[in-house]
Amino acid sequence: MRAVPRAPRIEGRGLLTLLLIGAVGLSALSVPWGGDLVHPGGGSAVGSIVKALARVELSPEFLRITAYAAWTTLRFAVAGVTLALAIGLPLGVVASGVLTRSGGRKTASIVVARFVLALLRSIHELVWAWLFVVAIGLSPMAVILALALPYAGILGRVFADALIDVPEEPLRALRSAGASEIKLLVYGRLTIALPDMLGYGFYRFECAIRSAAIFSFVGVQGLGYQIQLSLDDLLWNEVWTLLIALAALVLLVDAWSSQVRRRLVS
Amino acid sequence: MTHLADTPIIRVENAAKAYSGRLAIAPLSFTVAEGEKVAVLGPSGSGKTTLLHLTAGIIHPDSGTVELGGHATSELGAGGESASLVGAIHQQYDLVGHLSVVHNVLAGRLGRWGLLRSLWSLLSPQDLGLAEDALERVGLLERLYERTSRLSGGEQQRVAIARLLVQDPRVIVADEPVASLDPARARDLLILLSSVASDAGKTLVASLHSTELATEFFDRAIGLRDGLVVFDLPVMELDRGILDDLYHLEVAG
Amino acid sequence: MIAIRERRPATRPGLVRVSAIGFGLLAVLAWGQVLAGGDSGAGDLFRGDTWTRAGEFAGELLGLGAEGESAFVDGALWQNAIGLSVETLAMSVLAAGIAGAAALVSFLPAARNVAYGELGGSRRAVGVPGYMVLRLLFAFTRGVPELVWALIIVFVFSPGVLAGALALAVHNYGILGKLAAEVVENMDTRPARALRGAGANNFQMVLYGVLPQALPHLLTYLLYRWEVIIRTTVVVGFVAAGGLGREFRLQMSYLHYDEVALLLICYLALVIGVDLVSAGLRRLAR
């Protein structure tokens, strides 16, 4: 009689899938299924939304408004990301611990930096926005800060991990040539980690554009503000134009990002 | 009216194949009788892989014909008909690493299974007995439910042979099956492959780097160089001179 | 025939440099316009009374100086908040489920190698246009932020958990679809093509050769996205009136800042909890 191994019970991954499907089913229970799930006017709303796609607003005047709004959104995104880099990069370097020598002070600085980064990024940008607006009033800086702080937290953490993950061998060569830790950082770690960091930075830039668009809903000029205006008047054809502009802006940055990353890798 | 027994299982007639304007296989012809074991020898770049892929019906010739069991490969659709005629094994990457061994082996039945059965088998392996028999033959029965990527290179090649056993084609085409293995395991694998073929009267066509292995396990050797057949001899008649001619490096000037 | 990979000289060697300069220019323009405009608020940051106002606000968040009892000791409020947190959690799970399911059924034809028949199958007539349509769909749905989707969806669906979940699902569908398609595109297709030699048709080839590798990745991406979704659920609930988000809006309009702080704590707890669960589940999936 040959020894045939016994078939395994449902393995880890199968169990996981079942668990997840169950979780989704459970959460569907919290939806008040029933008649008034859809608006009374919901069906016709869908109709007008879809029909408006065929008559997307393309008048030169509106296109100019759209372009200016897109430019405003882009500006806010850039300002936010640059500030986020200014805050996040130094924090990330400290949090990675690559510049300090081991010891009590090193652990303390790492813990503090990581805690600050975690705090920054755990709070959603809109919550930050609300905090700033209530504290210092509605202004461009409030919005930029609300974008920059959580992004600094995210970027800082990713940068810290990227710096730590640099493999040892190339660094050893530099170290034996007598490079100080700072030089090691600049010439060694940064150059190696740069493609990944840049890739993630660009991705964050793409997200920043979306965030900036949302921020502009609250009154600061931009695509969000315009979408709000058109929505209030139920001008769906204008809404489509603005949505396409927003998606196009995001896509452009995405394409730019993949081009730059490809050049860096080759 | 030719007797079926006289019909060669593989017939290549003036088959040629070019890539990017460069001729990989010049028009060449040969036949293989059922049950023969043919080794294809030649230096790198001589077109061995192309020839084997043509023989297996994986690619089709630009001109001329390749016939398997009397059918032109260009007319054989992918699927059960072709799979029962010819099966292939490569140097590596035949198996799906993420699947367990049993599924990789049973993949040999895909040509005969419908879509629903293929899907259901992933949850509850169908025709399990076939897989067990095949794995026992190659000596890996205890690895039945392990994830394929955890097996060593030599073991994975044996699983690939098990898949071929389940698929049960009349012709086995092997493209450098032992190139990634150390000499001891290479020999073991060829012992297995050769006996698997002999047991069922299957035809075996394999490309090899090692002429020692060719002489030991095959009946016939075809030498290929720059897409042309340099020799087609019984393995006993190979000698130093012929092999040197095949492998010699062109020295410039 | 030995194929030698030639190192092609970059057609635009300066792209990286040009990009860097371009971005720097953008940054200068952006900040210039911010700081040049008189009401940028930059000056406000350094004014004395801004900081006192901020300090007062912080105090209000902590429930100091408020009339009556601080929200933190009110048991009923905590209970309400926890109930809403569960609702928010459900919204996030539902959203992830819908996005994941939708991405699951549409990521394969959106992979270039599948659509263009590079896996050895015939290039189906529906393959290439289907690929383009799907990629455009992914791009559009992910380009528009969840909040905007929520604003649109409440025109059709009554505000609530489903509206919020749908808004989140639409946006994340685009993200997951693109990621999953890219997994298939970057995959080693030799095992799949070898299956063809074993007699597999297109479906079987995908079932045995592509899915076993792609599905674990999709699952991992889904779990990562869940972490992002839970953070955004609160915000979407603001607009789509579900879960913690709805309560935020309410308490902010009443200026009950200490209750807002209570809700913020629940929010943070949810985020941390989901991060932990997601990490654990991801380890299970490996």
Image: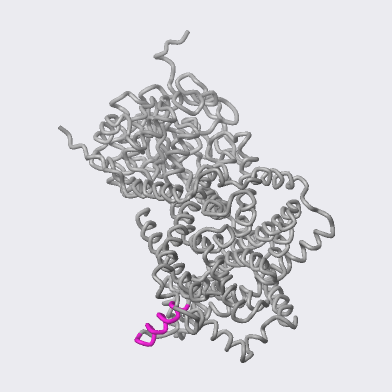
Residue plotted at (49% across, 84% down): C65
Decide which of C258, B29 is in the foreground and name it.
C258
Asked if one can make out residue B252 in the rendered structure from this viewpoint, the answer is no
B117 in relation to B176, above or below: above
A65 horizontally vs B19: left or right: right
Q: Residue furthest left?
A: A1
Q: Position of residue B154 (x, y in %)?
A: 31, 45
B138 horizontally vs C14: left or right: left
Examine the residues drawn in magenta and state their main secondary structure: helix
Q: Is residue A106 magenta?
A: yes
Decide which of B154, B112 is in the foreground and name it.
B112
Q: Residue furthest bottom?
A: C48
Q: Is residue B179 magenta?
A: no
Q: Position of residue A111 (x, y in %)?
A: 40, 80
Residue plotted at (41% across, 49% down): A26
Instruction: Indicate the quadrant where residue B4 lies.
Output: top left
Residue plotted at (24% across, 35% down): B136
Q: Position of residue A153 (x, y in %)?
A: 51, 74
Asked if one can make out residue B57 in the rendered structure from this viewpoint, the answer is yes
Instruction: Indicate the quadrant where residue A200 lies.
Output: bottom right
Q: Please state the extent of the stretch shown in magenta in the rendering.
A: A103-116
Residue plotted at (45% across, 72% down): C262
Decide which of C135, A53 is in the foreground and name it.
A53
Instruction: Indicate the quadrant where residue A247 lies.
Output: bottom right
Q: How many marks?
A: 0
